[in-house]
Image (cartoon, helix red, strand yellow):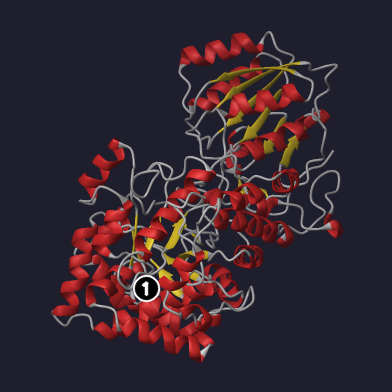
């Protein structure tokens, strides 16, 4: 790494003023080790006591910033920073507000490629450590895998949570012909591998806190915000996989974050756009929502993210959980015994802004028991609101100190007081290695779920079905994609020896587009159609029905939620891939071609479209060849 972006080790150690020895990190997997080390805690408390009120307030915030560089972003990113934050660069943001963390987004141009991310991380740490009483920063992102990824290729991209939940549980649970035959639940080994490998790659580029895994139990098929981001509908299975992934991430010295407490899995509303209500009774919450969070805490989870949801059974005030003292302090801290870092979901989401103004939300969150305030719409408003609340007596400085101590303990546990910097050589040794990519492919092969296979249509034969038309949905691409799903599927099938043609038709194909696809299908030996959350009135359904009318064999691949099969009962072969990322689409292509057996089993039930009270395919269902 260039000297301008990575100070010498001597400079780093001098900056931390002798804290390193006292803050030595305990062994991997030790929960909140620094908090149990009296000598370390004494040093941290002394550090907190020397901080000014303004520095303390800053430590509570985790903020977005535009640009690929901490000091020299592109002009468009300078303009965006000036408009939204009132600073030009990440370095200026840190100097003005003394924030305790930065969050990376692809749309903020923070994550172009691994070397650039590493340089940005080093620049951010250098900017903070160069200040009086400079502290290392927690650098975070949402690398859930599947449909939510901020760091794309050449980093290793894994299947998402629901795909992992569908994965083969173990050698004792091989699928049997005809469906059924094994207990659902996914592989804890795969979940641990995902966390360990992804954590190592994130740490190599300077990201030390990941907002994953999702601990929500997705019990509502209509859930618009969680869905395939959840491991499934079985709370015990979700709990096992959450715990395994937590241990994987934290073995690589990346803080895992279980989200969204107290559980966002049973809602038809998206908290990005409105304030959802969860109407579980207390008994239902204990049985459905709590187990994954209990498991995460038992696994030593470093941080837990709040949900902007109202749960009347847990707090009758009509306040979202992010602002609820009964939920965060009473249940999470008191009943569940959690003493790690609590971080809000983004404070720019409408779910937390519905009832209170942007000046009240951060203050109320701290009063509820939050430690980190994530991504407020206006940092200046939020920062000054907290500062004034202390000066006016609504918040005490001692209350701030509690949160700051938790944050510093986490930074110490992650070794950031020792050396927060990364190297390009470390990036090259770690990110997107052949072994890591192979691990992702192996996991993906265990996830593709075959739900229908009439007449043993699958696997396709290159002799009988040589010419394949691939049509269907082309949703906005997550970071794990190199093009439209139809193109990725066609390319993967071509590599397997078929003559495959891609014809993207979108998530709402027009009549003219449907006609074009039907005409092309008549010239093909078989048709693969990628479907995306098909509804009763969707033109995707019209497309599939018209394709079936051609008489050509049709294979449907659900590339998001696995419920599409209920809307398409006449399709002779149906696969659930759980995402349209490359690793999952390549695995689906190998299943279609018969290169691997379909091993996945549904981690959620699929209800009948005409009678949602009845289950069409239960948890654990899946066919084999």
**Position of residue 592 measured from the top left corner of the image (x, y, whole percent):** 76, 31
Image-based side of 623 in relation to 283, left or right? right
Image-based side of 442 in relation to 20, left or right? right
**Position of residue 372 measured from the top left corner of the image (x, y, whole percent):** 37, 68
Whether 350 is drawn above or below 61: the answer is above
Whether 528 is drawn above or below 15: the answer is above
Whether 43 is drawn above or below 537: the answer is below
**Residue shown at the point (61%, 32%) measured from the top left:** 568
**Position of residue 618 measured from the top left corner of the image (x, y, whole percent):** 68, 52
Q: Nearer the viewer, residue 381 or 49?
A: 49
Quadrant of the frame with the C terminus:
top right
Q: Secondary structure at mark 1?
A: loop
**Residue farthest toward the left in the current orientation of the protein:** 392
**Position of residue 598 measured from the top left corner of the image (x, y, whole percent):** 78, 41
Q: Pointer 1: what residue?
A: 371
Check disc 1: other Cα within 10 Å, few if <14, some if 14-19, many if 20+.
many
Q: Nearer the viewer, residue 31 or 314?
A: 31
**Residue shown at the point (44%, 85%) measured from the top left:** 334
């Amino acid at each position: 790494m260039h000297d301008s972006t990575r100070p010498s080790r001597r400079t780093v150690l001098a900056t931390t003023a002798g804290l390193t020895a006292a803050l030595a990190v305990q062994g991997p997997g030790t929960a909140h080790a620094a908090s149990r080390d009296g000598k370390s805690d004494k040093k941290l408390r002394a550090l907190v006591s020397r901080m000014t009120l303004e520095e303390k307030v800053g430590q509570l915030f985790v903020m977005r910033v535009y640009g690929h560089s901490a000091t020299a972003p592109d002009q468009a990113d300078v303009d965006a920073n000036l408009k939204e934050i009132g600073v030009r660069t990440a370095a200026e943001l840190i100097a003005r507000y003394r924030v305790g963390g930065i969050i990376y987004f692809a749309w903020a141009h923070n994550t172009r490629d691994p070397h650039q991310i590493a340089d940005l991380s080093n620049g951010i740490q250098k900017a903070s450590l160069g200040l009086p009483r400079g502290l290392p920063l927690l650098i975070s992102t949402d690398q859930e895998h599947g449909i939510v990824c901020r760091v794309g290729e050449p980093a290793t991209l894994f299947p998402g949570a629901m795909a992992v939940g569908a994965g083969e549980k173990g050698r004792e649970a091989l699928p049997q012909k005809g469906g059924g035959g094994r207990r659902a639940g996914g592989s804890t080994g795969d979940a641990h591998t995902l966390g360990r490998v992804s954590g190592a790659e994130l740490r190599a580029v300077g990201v030390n806190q990941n907002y994953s895994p999702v601990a929500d139990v997705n019990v509502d098929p209509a859930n618009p915000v969680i869905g395939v981001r959840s491991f499934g509908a079985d709370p015990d299975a979700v709990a096992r996989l959450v715990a395994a992934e937590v241990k994987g991430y934290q073995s690589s010295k990346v803080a895992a974050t279980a989200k969204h407490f107290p559980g966002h899995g049973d809602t038809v509303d998206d908290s990005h756009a409105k304030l959802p209500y969860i109407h579980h009774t207390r008994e239902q919450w204990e049985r459905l929502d709590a187990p994954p969070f209990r498991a995460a805490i038992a696994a030593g989870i470093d941080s837990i993210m709040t949900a902007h949801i109202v749960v009347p059974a847990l707090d009758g005030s009509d306040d979202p959980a992010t602002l609820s003292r009964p939920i965060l302090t009473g249940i999470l801290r008191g009943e569940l015994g959690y003493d790690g870092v609590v971080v809000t979901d983004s404070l720019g989401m409408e779910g937390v802004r519905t009832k209170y103004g942007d000046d009240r939300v951060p203050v109320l969150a701290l009063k509820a028991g939050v430690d980190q305030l994530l991504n407020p719409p206006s940092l200046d408003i939020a920062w000054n609101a907290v500062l004034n609340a202390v000066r006016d007596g609504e918040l005490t400085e001692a209350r701030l100190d509690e949160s700051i101590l938790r944050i510093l303990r986490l930074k110490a546990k992650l070794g950031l007081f020792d050396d927060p910097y990364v190297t390009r050589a470390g990036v090259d040794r770690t990110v997107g290695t052949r072994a890591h990519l192979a691990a992702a492919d192996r996991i993906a092969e265990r996830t593709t779920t075959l739900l229908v296979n009439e007449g043993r249509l699958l696997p396709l034969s290159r002799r009988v079905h040589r010419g394949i038309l691939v049509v269907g949905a082309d949703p906005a691409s997550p970071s794990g994609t190199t093009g439209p799903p139809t193109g990725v599927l066609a390319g993967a099938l071509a590599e397997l020896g078929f003559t495959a043609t891609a014809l993207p038709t979108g998530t709402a194909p027009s009549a003219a587009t449907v006609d074009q696809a039907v005409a092309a299908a008549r010239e093909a030996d078989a048709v693969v159609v990628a479907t995306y959350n098909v509804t009763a009135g969707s033109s995707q359904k019209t497309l599939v029905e018209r394709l079936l009318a051609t008489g050509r064999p049709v294979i449907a691949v659900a590339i998001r939620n696995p419920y599409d099969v209920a809307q398409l009962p006449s399709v002779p072969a149906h696969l659930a891939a759980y995402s349209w990322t490359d690793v999952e689409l390549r695995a689906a292509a190998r299943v279609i071609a018969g290169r691997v057996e379909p091993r996945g089993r549904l981690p959620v039930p699929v209800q009948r479209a005409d009678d949602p009270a009845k289950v069409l395919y239960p948890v654990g269902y899946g066919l084999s060849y």
